Image (cartoon, rainbow, N blue to C red):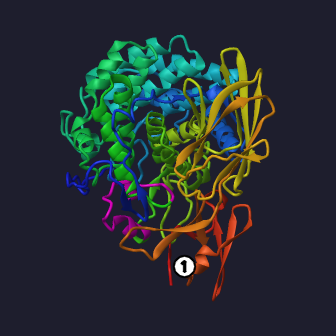
Amino acid sequence: MRNSNSRSRRSFLKSTSFALAAAAGSQVWFPSLTSAALSARPLDEFSYSDVSITSDLHKRQLHESQAVLMSLSEDSLLKPFRQMAGQPAPGEELGGWYTYKPDFDYRQENWEGFVPGATLGQWISALARGYAIGGSEATRERILRLNQLYAKAISGDFFEKNRFPAYCYDKFVCGLIDSHKYAGDPDAFSILDHTTNVAAPHLPGKAIEHDVRWRPGNLDDSWTWDESYTISENLFLAYQRGAGGRYKSLGKDYLDDIYYDPLSENRSNFVGRHAYSHVNSLSSAMQAYLTLGSEKHLHAATNGFAFLSAQSFATGGWGPDELLRAPGSDDIFASLTNSHSSFETPCGSYAHFKLTRYLLRVYRDSRYGDSMERVMYNTILGARPLEADGRTFYYADCNFDGRKVYSKNRWPCCSGTYPQIIADYGVSAYFRDEQDVYVNLYVPSTLHWTRGSNKISLTQTGNYPFDSQMQFALRLTRSEEFAIHLRIPVWATGAFVAVNGKRVSSAVEPGTFAAIRRKWKSGDRVELELPLANRLEAVNDTHPDVVALLSGPLVLFAIKDTAPMITRGQLLAAKKVASGRWQAETGSGPVTFLSFTAIDEERYSTYLKLS
């Protein structure tokens, strides 16, 4: 959430839609949008309660983030709402962005009071998802109580006095519809209707872009930074979940077709746009397809993701300095020295997971899962934890001299998306259709589902991506035939699958889902081997000797005080010496490489210049 002054409509890709292109040292694809490709019904998500993740790191992130949200004072959470409504407002200020400051000036270094109350809806959403995962009654009671307190405090004055009325409204919609679906709040929809009634007179009525003045009065530039062009997704979801037809109509009203129309024709207008919010907006385009059947919006999201892939770091992150860039430009390379603000991690990961989840469901293309996996292991899973005093990890740093640091601002926007993306790991790991199950993320976990009266579980174990093999164990009430589809990453040459110790004879092709169809019985075992050969990816075609070292989905970050002299062969020969740690031998001594999740205070570099 920031100001982005430069806006360009310059198209940077004129090639035919859906052709393969090369950018940033890796392949970018344009899936076919033929009627045949869209003939299958989109895959369904499992519910939050269907997946139990047992990975220590994933579990710790969820536990810690939920604990922070449960610890916050309810009076402090409601304080800006009560202040802006002229109500008594007891309790201490949370501080940071969350605080209400009528005299806030964005030109000052201290941004306390930038967007008061904005993250409450996201925190309620995260608690509702956490309740669905863990079933804590204390969590549900807190959700219902916060919603009632919010309903008494929310007013038109909140939206009138806020720089981000649409942004805040969007988060409240999300929190309330998640409260209804995942926590069973019987009053959530009536509170949503009340929120919509008081918010509507203070919203623009349609999608308004960054830096466009629409509010009356002599207001400074920060009043033009609202993000109404992102809100259709949650409005369509509200309609789908039964909140009423007005939300379908509102979702249509806020579709940003000035942005989507060129993308639907494979013409990029990305350059200079605020990165997170415009990638997030592509999920609204996907919901326009899923809700309205609009193939134009599907085309926009599909092409938009391809453009995004063409300007991404090896980590899967994008948007240095929170701006979208053109593939083929030198901006991504330049950011390795001129910026530490490489990828807005919790917000960007949240948007990236949602978009790739939608696209994977529609196309059943495993490469969207590959992209999601990169972002998970190389950015958000290694983020510093959210702290109860509002310290928040904001940027994953791809600079030649990178470090993990907290944002200088407390309770920024990423403090809202951090607990949401942490809760979403499970629903991103598995999908299903009428017959089969799809395994997308390889994370120790157990999936539970039913087929009629047959209760089935699939338990995944292993130490991937630090080891190459995953194991899956099935439990069923009775034997039944269906297929398990395993994502085979595009880099996984030589992958194979074994069932009950016997290697399957069918080919396992990288860049696909490998389908193992049989009549499964309780106790059946599946093993998947994904060879983790080292490989290099250049930052772009212009700088083929500035490369990142990867093993499977992991970027291996060089730990260093000074840039090492290292050759291509020496990098490719790097050996794993411990879990999360590699070492390469050079003429001047060994160089250590760590996964992002293993980095603490060390200085590191994502890319190295080959000698």
Q: Nearer the viewer, residue 464 or 169?
A: 464
Q: Which residue is under mark 1?
A: 568
The mark tally for this picture is: 1
Q: Which stretch did the figure color magenta?
A: 315-336
Determine whether, in the image, residue 425 is placed left or right of residue 336.
Answer: right
Residue 126: x percent and y percent?
56, 32
Residue 168: x percent and y percent?
39, 31
Instruction: Residue 145: say if magenta.
Output: no
Determine whether, in the image, residue 602 is placed left or right of residue 477.
Answer: left
Q: Residue furthest right?
A: 523
Instruction: Residue 323: say if magenta.
Output: yes
Determine whether, in the image, residue 607 is placed left or right of residue 61.
Answer: left
Q: Nearer the viewer, residue 270 or 571?
A: 571
Residue 3: x percent and y percent?
31, 50
- Residue positioned 20% across, 35% down in the render: 214
Say what amino acid the circle numbered 1 marks: Arg
* Quarter-of-image position of residue 467: bottom right
